[in-house]
Amino acid sequence: VSVHETNGNPSPRNIQIRRNVITDAYSTASHSQGMWIRKTEDLLIEENVFDHNGWHGTISGADRTIFNHNIYLKEDKHVTVRNNILSRGSLMGVKCSSDATGGFKDFIIEGNLYVANAVGSFLDASKTFSTMSHEGFIIRNNVLIDLAKFVEGADRAGGFQLITTKDGLVENNVIVNKDPSVLGGGAGITVQFKPHQNLTVRNNVIYNWPRKQGKPAMELNPQDPAELTETGNLVEINPSLFIDPTRTVESYHASIGGQATLDAFISEAKQQSKVNWRTQYTTQAVTSYIRVGCSFDLKDD
């Protein structure tokens, strides 16, 4: 799926992309995304299944690369990405890119299930860009689980990564189970050492997130610490305090009578349609199950 402005024409507006199954996009000759959307306004991406976009496991020249993703958004405004399944992308579940001050503005990423991507979401700007490229955003109530090993000669993986932002909120996300063979890459939540203004990171859970040389599972390093509010995050706490932090998409599928594999769950999710909409294969059902596992077990003393 590709939507973008062309030749200086007005930006496309009022776009809704709902309840689609978008899978297995790849190319041997160019970049390839499940969805590429650039410079639009008033965009809704909701309750879709994105799986295995940007690469192919057995075709030469279609390997995973850092340039391909399930969703790639560039300098859009008034965007909502809600309740999507985002699985096994080449690199990212959702990339949000901007090389202009406030170029990516007024957006919400909420309620999504990220599974087996190498990176969850990156609020990205070019390496030389140093002012607030992403403005007015909320990243909340997502579940990011089972980060996969990225295999293009790089040991990298990461959860939610923010380069330079203004007026942002990251809250109530559950970020768990990084591939133990992947020690490089980013934290579960990374705020890079660049300018940020009025950023809040609160009430997130990060668990089972191994990294090299004892690096922390959450790295919050804004250039001006006074511009960051951090509270209520549970990072690598004692797992015995949770009800069951080992819950996965696979165990969820077994709990509803399915085969306990990611392939089996995704295969069923791909069968979603207008005439065959099953709530047990929605993001809400899976994320609720995993969230309960990562909540406190309130035992009697």
Image (spheres, rainbow, N blue to C red):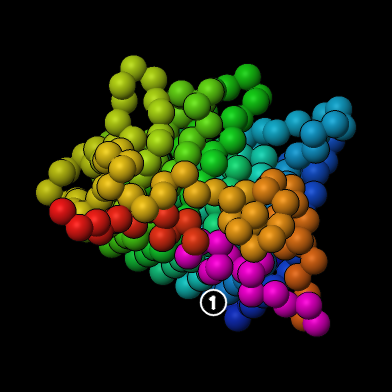
Horizontal placement of 238 versus 58: left or right?
A: left
Quarter of the image where the N terminus is located? bottom right
Q: Is residue 196 above or below residue 149?
A: below
Magenta stretch: give its range.
Answer: 275-288
Instruction: Give the x, y percent position of residue 75.
Output: 52, 59
Image location of residue 227, percent across then percent down: 17, 51
In the current view of this chain or complex, which residue is farthest to the front? 301
Total labels drawn: 1
Viewer-closest of 195 and 288:
288
Secondary structure that dominates the magenta span: helix
The quadrant in which residue 198 appears is: bottom left
In the rendered image, is residue 222 in sight? Answer: yes
Location of residue 103 in the rendering, given as x and y in whole percent from the top left corner:
45, 59
Identify the residue at image location x=51%, y=53%: 96
Residue drawn at the location 64% of the way across and 69% of the way down = 280
Query: Is 282 included in the stretch rendered in magenta?
Result: yes
Q: Verify whether residue 219 appears in magenta.
A: no
The type of residue carrying mark 1 is Asp
Name the residue that disc number 1 marks.
42
Q: Is residue 201 above or below residue 182?
A: below
Q: Nearer the viewer, residue 177 or 225?
A: 177
> Is residue 166 shown above or below 106?
above
| Name of the residue lying farthest toward the right | 59
Which quarter of the rendering shows the C terminus? bottom left
Task: Report the residue at 80% width, 38% height from top.
Answer: 56
Q: Along the horizontal axis of the image, is 208 left or right of 270?
A: left
At a point 80% along the width and 82% down the height, the residue shown is 275
